[in-house]
Amino acid sequence: MNKENLENSRSVLAVDIGGTNIKTALIDSDYNIADEIKSKTPTTYEELIDYISSLYNNDINALSVAIPGGYNYDKNTIFAPNLTILNGKNILADLKNTFKNIPILIENDANLATLGEYHYIEKAEINNMILLTLGTGVGGGVIINGKLHKSHTSTFEIGHIISVDNGRKCGCGRYGCLDEYANLHALTLTYNELSNTESNLSPAKIGALVDEGDLIAKETFYIYSKHLAKAITDLINIFVPDKVKLGGGLSELSKYYLDDTIKIINNDIFPLYKGITIVEVASLKNKAGVIGAAVNYFKGS
């Protein structure tokens, strides 16, 4: 990787593994990104390990990896409904074969995105924040009193709360999870259900149809906003954060659903909490994961 722009020799290789794409960046302690690469996520676990290992060089002080699933810190095992090649694997042990004698940190991707957004954007202003990642899957993280909420495993699998009783089957094995109604593929499924078609329209194309006046596309995003608002309302009722932020690929399409989402939240929220929490799109967008991976090394969680 090209390191010419690094202003500090102490650098971390940040790796954000997504269900669709993998992003890597070399980041110094001032969070300057020397190089960033985005490519398709390998289809096998062995190829994934080989890809990350190929990025090793002697100038890297640490490796910090974001994974799209739950991580058990004690057993170093993973459950990733949207990237099953990781399930049951000990990625820490496998990466140690290449990244010898340097720290290796593993954490849930949404937790790290939350950490990145908070420390890089909000730390001086607020104490409590929730971030939802809306992408191949739905994830999230919560900052409480300036700290990422953690347990003996990664926490806050918001994508696996029930949104619809006996609804669509989720990769986690349950039915009706929020993940199945608020991820990238969910918009296509909803559009097809409403139109009684079997299209393969992307979320961006459905958004373009809204711009053209397509009523089914508009209703698709309204249904999306209802699922999202229900989850966010419950989160505010529990945590009462200063902000709820939306990240991930679908945050780029927020103009089609955010206003309706906020209206529904304001209508349904516990009356005492109305107006307390700001709901907005995350500032770091798709850089939150790699920035958070760097924060996890330089500052801890």
Image (cartoon, rainbow, N blue to C red):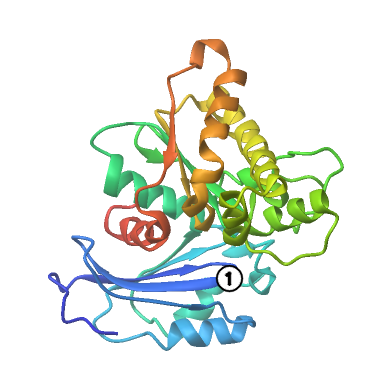
Quarter that holds the N terminus: bottom left
Q: Residue at point 55% right, 81% down?
A: 48
Residue 102 is drawn in which quadrant? bottom left
Does residue 185 sit above or below 6 in this rendering?
A: above
Residue 47 is drawn in which quadrant? bottom right
Does residue 165 sit above or below 171 in this rendering?
A: above
Q: Position of residue 62 (x, y in %)?
A: 32, 71
Which three-letter amino acid code belongs to the residue tagged 1? Thr
Q: Position of residue 262 (x, y in %)?
A: 53, 30
- Residue furthest top in the image: 272
Closer-to-camera residue (224/79): 224
**Observer able to see residue 285:** yes
Left or right: residue 130 compared with residue 41:
left
Closer-to-camera residue (179/86): 179
Residue at which label 1 appears? 20
Does residue 21 sit above or below 257 in this rendering?
A: below
